[in-house]
Image (cartoon, rainbow, N blue to C red):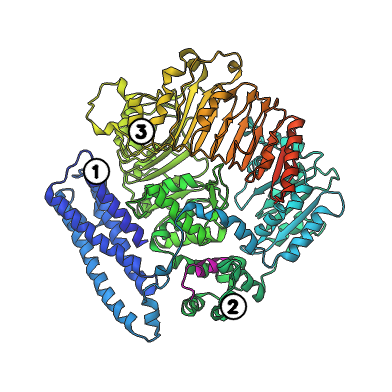
Amino acid sequence: MAYAAILSLKLTLEQILLHPDRHPNPHERQLMDSLNEKLGFLQQFLEQVSSHQSVETVERRIRDAAYEAEDAVALHQIDPHPLSMDVVAAQNSVGSKFNNHGKETEKNYLLTIGQEIDYIVQEVTKFKEQLEVYTTQESESSVEKETEIDKFHHTDDFDHSLNSSSNLDSSMSKNTMVGFDDYFIRMKDQLTGGPSALKVISIVGMGGIGKTTLAANVYNDSSIAYHFDIHAWTTISQSYCTRGIILGLLGSMKMMTDYMHQESDDRLGHHLYKALKGNRYLIIIDDIWDTDPWDEVRRMFPDDNTGSRIILTTRISKVAAFASTSGFVYQISLLSNDQSWLLLRAKVFGDESCPLDLQETGKKIAQKCQGLPLSVVLIGGLLSKVNMTREAWQNVAQNVTSSVDQCFEILKLSYNYLPHYLRACFLYMGVFPEDHEIPVSKLIKLWVAEGFLNQDQSQSMEEVAERCLNELIERSLILPSKRNSGKRLKTCKIHDLLRDFCVTESNKENFMYVTKRYLSVSPNSLHCLRRISIHPMAILDNLLVSSTPSVSFARSFITIGNHKISSELFLQFKLLRVLDAIQVEFLQFPYEILELLSLRYLAFTCKEDMPASISKLWNLQTLISNQYSSSKQGKFLPFEIWRMPHLRHVKFKKAYLLDPVAVKFNPNETYFVLENLQTLSGIWDLKLTKDVLRKIRNIMKLNIIYDSRRCKEKGWSYYQFENLVNLHKLQALKISLVPGTNWLVNWTLPPLFNFTFPPTLKKLTLRGCGIPWHDLATVGSLPNLEVLKLKDHACLGTTWEPNKGEFRRLQFLLLEDSDLIHWRADSGNFPCLEHLILQWCFKLLEIPSGLGESSTLDTIELNGCKASAFDSAMSILETQQSYGNESFRVVGHSRSNFSYRKMHAFN
């Protein structure tokens, strides 16, 4: 973690220059420039070496020195002349070389840090000289092997675009089926044949052996998809609750509604039972660790002799035998040496052949993986990044562990071969619980706030984070999961073994502490932790507020799940950069947060309005706040939020943002321009004046909600929607009118519809806006629009006939809750359309038959539509089949009972 520590220290030093109340003199700037030059030298050294034993000693020395220096800088930012005993004591704990009991000058303070870093530079310089001697020798001594320059780092050749991972899902599914053909065929026969009684099939084997992969391939098989009326998947893992299992199944079946979250477990179970009753269903229960969860949920699966099936995956044989009383248990064996080689070869070369001079070494590597698919895939990901030479492959072969019980050694090998700039990103995945669907947008914001990303002048920090995520996916260390309507990665996951490795390695590196069942650390030792992650089911009884205020050196405090935490606790963490307490409900605004001047990421839930003093958090980049009060009254954001220039992402459930023009202020004050703001979400009744938009001119994602009654009274012109065209970087826009839509039916529209949008827009969601269908031409003319969602009577009228030349790049179209009856269009109107969804369009007679001639359309989904609309979709299916498009799918939901029914599916 030395590399991440160096980057973090450099970023912290930059805050001295950016602080609005401090202005370093020329000499102080000279000291900082000199210090940055030394840190740059250390950074370059780390980029050139690997993490063998001798280098790791130097890395730890660099890391510890950077940590201490950063702690001193952060404490100095809190108070340049600390008088309180707690701060003095904390500084003394860092080391007397960094302070003079609160009396040091700025000059001495920076000079002392520079001298300490200079000692490290001298050590590294000597080490580099020794390293050069070793690397020039041709002997293969163990000393040379432990200190050689990393030959793998400079041979990486990969696409840095996040979108390049889009094909990984299908290729992974294909490759990891090696060795499962027999299981696959037999399981398909048991699912579609045999007795009509409910059958439970268990897949059992060790972690990483491919149980979930086998279940997923069966689940996604086209013939299986066609055979069953209902499909659902849920993952349980070690930490489970019955409610979570039921919600997971209902969500997978697309049966979830907002009110269900407030219902009892029994009522939820009743909903699940009723939805499955009378249907032929296939349920996957993945990663079950005990018999108790199966005991609690099996009564919710009706046995109506319809041929329904349930598949369980587990690592424990007794759980498999307990659930599958009829003996339908698949014990997954390790791969043979030949199968391991086939899998390894497919992972590295895909459909291409392996060079003859690499085959012998490749087979040895595959053999050393001992038949564990996880090991094969991880090593394959590594081999795909090194030089395709015998020497490079032999170096890998010499380090591959030969025991399955030592799988962590393989994980350690993959970790060691990561570029330094990826290691902190990878270990950070341990922050999240096992089997957690990790939101990519949140992960990126956290990485940026943590400060261990390498800045790139040609890219934003968010783009750098996306690039790092993509590289970890390419190396099979992070798994892509769900994608959004624009095909961008929405969530990702990490394998349990990899996550366990992250947690273990993080503890060794003093990088992160993750709670398990109990928080096994005393308050007195909190000061030595860099990051703390509190997971669900953790008991925090011994995490008490110290009677004597202290300063912890933790940079992150992340809670996942519901916890009761006193806001006074945060006084112990004055150097926090990240505070994620979104599921902690504060009855009153936690004013203690305002003492955390280093915060860059803040997420919390509170009933009260936000105070003006929030502007004290001048470093803040991400501000997320939920309101859990049952009242419909939204929060009023203080005017002072316009004084926080580093804000990048602001997200609320319901908040009102005051117009800075309406308040007297100095027009020359630069802090009234949120130049870095990229995301603004959950803002109500925002008047889009030119002055306001100039102050958020770099916004990329905008989500605004308007009160329908107020909008009806004032008219569209009051909100000046025509000014949206001035947001030249806007890519995603959502405009909603709430509450309800009944008033729209009889509402007389204004004589002039004044929506205009910037040409940069790629994703547009309109809800309840009541736009005449013919005025949608304004949207259709957007040159870059790829995703369009029209919800809750977004458009009014019974007929839609788009003009020729519109929607030239549209790939995803959703129509939801519409009174549309006649839709006249053909493939020429939507030349790039791939995915069409119709929800609750009760009056629509049919889908335009001309869409059947589209060469790009691959999926139509219908829910709550007329039978004639379903028939037209099936007609399009037949047309597509006649063109040889066997991948085309039509997915439908029954309007009568809302149960899920697959009409037809081809994969």
Mark number displayed over residue 696? 3
Circle 2 is placed at which residue position? 363
The picture quadrant where one finds residue 53 is: bottom left
Which residue occupies 62% across, 21% down? 797
Q: Is residue 591 left or right of residue 562?
A: left
**Relative depth, front residue between 62 and 724:** 724
Sequence-first disc among 1 and 2: 1
Which residue occupies 43% across, 71% down? 152
Above or below, 739 against 650 in this view is above
Residue 14 is situated, as x and y percent measured from the top left of the image, at 25, 49
Secondary structure under the numbered disc 1 in the rendered image? helix
Residue 339 is situated, as x and y percent measured from the top left of the image, at 66, 72
Disc 3 and disc 2 in contact, CB within 8 angstroms: no
Circle 1 is placed at which residue position? 18
Sequence-first disc among 3 and 2: 2
Residue type at numbered disc 3:
Ile
The picture quadrant where one finds residue 64 is: bottom left
Residue 384 is situated, as x and y percent measured from the top left of the image, at 51, 68
Asked whether residue 129 appears in the rendered view, the answer is: yes
In magenta segment, residue 766: no
Distance in Å between CA atoms under marks 1 and 2: 56 Å
Distance in Å between CA atoms under marks 3 and 2: 57 Å
Residue type at numbered disc 1:
Leu
In this rendering, the label closer to the viewer, 1 or 2: 2
